[in-house]
Amino acid sequence: MSSETKYCLPEGLPLPRAQRDGLDKEFWDATRRHELVVQRCKSCNAFQWGPEQICHKCYSADLGWHRVSGRGRLYSWTRTWNPVHPALRDACPYIVVVVELPDADNVRMVGNLVGDPHQQPRFDAEVEAVFEDHTAHTLVQWRIVN
Amino acid sequence: MAEYSIKDKVAIVGIGETQYYKRGQAPVSEFRLACEAIIRAADDAGIDVRDIDGISGYANDRNEASRLATALGLKHLGFAGMVWGGGGGGGSGAVGNAAAAVNAGYTKYCVVFRALAQGQFGRFGQAPRSEYISGPAAYTAPYGLFVPAQWVALRTHRFMHDYKINQEPLAAVAMADYYHAQFNPRAVMYGNPLTREKYNQSRWISEPFHLYDCCMENDGAAALIVTTADRARDAKKKPAWIMAAAQGSGYRHYAQVENQYDFSSANFKTLAPRLFEMAGITPKDVDCAQIYEHFSGAVMISLVEHGFCKPEEVMEFVTFENITAPKGKLPINTSGGNIAECYMHGLELVHEAVRQVRGESTCQVPDCKISLVASGPMVSPVSDLIVHSM
C-alpha cells in the first residue's frame, strides 16, 4: 500500500465523517494510519461491508475489525463525464471503480482509479489501495498493479 | 397454482395524467399536479372523485394521502399505503398494494398515483448539497459517485463484460423508446426523433451510458383507479384485469457500497417466478412489455430475469426490430417510457400497459391481450405487474 499526494478529485465534495453512533469510527481512524479494515463478526468470522449493527450471518452484535492487505480485484468501473456536483465541473472525466477484496470474502469497496482518467482498465485487473490524505480525513483510492 | 393470488379479482378501470413537462416547466405546484391527475383518472373510470376511498403511493411521495383526501373532499379514507423507498421500483408495487387492499375490502376505489416536479424540488440527476456526509454515502460521495446513472453504469458494465455485450442493445432500447414517442402526443420527446447518428454522437454521461441512454427529468403527475371485479364490469371503459403482481427484493440486495449479493442483477430473480406462477402464464404469452428504463442498459438485464431471453442471447434478442411495435417479437415501452414519454417514475409505463390491453395505445400491438410491467430495476424493492383483457 502507498500514499498519494495528488488528489483524484478536487476539494469541495462532501467530507466524510464517522457516523454518530460510532459504527464506522474504526474504519475512518484506520485510514488515517493508512490501514484498510473491514467489519468482521467475532462469533462466526463473517465479513460485511458496509458495516451494520449486527452480523447478517449469525446475528451476533459482537463485531470487530479485520485488517486486510489492500490488494483487490477490479470488479467494475465507469468513467463519469457529466459533472453531478459543482466541485466536479472541471474534474471530468474521472473513473469510479468497484473493487473486490479476496482476503475479506470479496466484500466490495468503491473508490477512484489513480492515474490517467482516459485509460481503459481491464476487468478483474489486480489493484492496490492508495491512501489519499486530506486535512481531516483519508480516502482510499485504487491503483492498477502491473 | 400459486399459494395466494389476486388474479382477476381486481382491475384497473381508469387512468389519468397531467400534461408532461420538461423539468422546471410545470406552471403549477406538484400537489396540484397530483390532484389534477387523480381527477382525470376518476373521470376516465366514470366515477365521482369522492368515491375514491383508498390512496396508494410509492417512492416516499411528498404529497401525503391525508392531504390529498382532504383537498379532494373524499368522503372517507379506508386505506393509505406506501411502498417503502426504492424510487421507481415501487410503481407496480403500489398497484399491487391497491389490489390487495381492494381485495381485502379496505377500499372500493383505490387510487395509485405519482407526482413529481423535479423542477420544484431536488433533481435525481444531481448530487444533494452538504458539507459533511456520514453513513453509507460517506464511502461513495467523496469519490464522486452520487447518482443512479453511475451505479447503474457500474452494474451494467460488469454484465456487459460477463456476457460479451456491446453498445448495440443499449442503443436499441433508446432508439425504440424515441421511435414509439413519435406517435404519442403526450410524450415530452414527441416531434423530436432520435437517429442512430445522433445517439452515437451524444455525450457520455457515465460509461457505458450516452445521454440518450438516460431517462429524462420531468414535472407532472399520473394516477390510476383500482377496483373490485363487480365494479369493474360496470366501468365506462374496458377494464385492465390484474393477472398478477409481485414486489420485493433478492438476498441482501440493499447491501451498501455496491455489496448487493448479486452484483449486476436487476433484482427481479425472486419476483419473476412468483409473478408468472400467479398469472398462470409463461413469458411467451406476453404480447407487450413495459420495462422500466431509468437507463437503457438495465432493460436487457430485466428482460433476462423475466425469462424473455438468456443473457447469452441479449445481442440477438434486444434489437430495434424485435422490441418495436407493431411487428416486433416483444414490443417494449410502446409509449416512449421514461426515456422519451415522461419520467413519471414509471407510472406512465403502467398506464401504457392499460392502454395496450384496452386497444388504445398510440403504438398499438395488434390483438394485445397481455401486457407486463417491470418497475425499477436494480433498486430495492422492485415490483412487477401483469394486466390483461378478458
Image: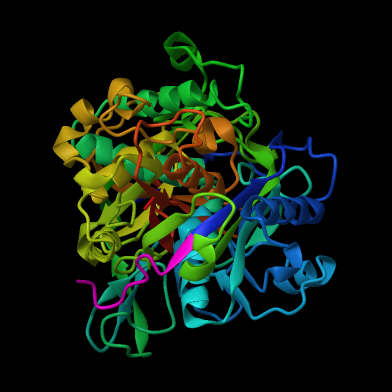
Give the side of residue B92 with respect to residue B57, left or right: left
Residue at 28% across, 41% down: B158
Give the side of residue B48 with respect to residue B78, left or right: right
Residue at 61% across, 22% down: B190
Residue at 34% across, 36% down: B367
Is B6 or B59 nearer to us in this picture? B6
What colouring does the structure picture have?
Answer: rainbow
Is B180 or A36 nearer to us in this picture? B180
A21 is higher (above) or lower (below) than B327:
below
Can residue B351 be spotted in the picture?
yes
Is A14 or B192 nearer to us in this picture? B192
Residue A18: % across, % down:
57, 70
Residue B329: % across, % down:
25, 30
For the N terminus of chain B, the image quarter is bottom left
As drawn, the residue found furthest toward the front would be B234
Magenta: main secondary structure equals: loop
Is A105 or B287 nearer to us in this picture? B287
Can residue B86 be spotted in the picture?
no
Residue at 38% across, 67% down: B248
Write down the region rendered in magenta: B1-11
Q: Can you tell which quarter of the image residue B231 is in?
A: bottom right
Q: Across the whole image, how many numbered discs are drawn on residues?
A: 0
- Residue B35 painted magenta: no
Residue B130: % across, % down:
71, 56
- Residue B8 painted magenta: yes
Residue A130: % across, % down:
40, 48
B258 is higher (above) or lower (below) than B3:
above
Give the side of residue A45 with respect to residue B149, left or right: left
Give the side of residue B12 with respect to residue A72, left or right: right
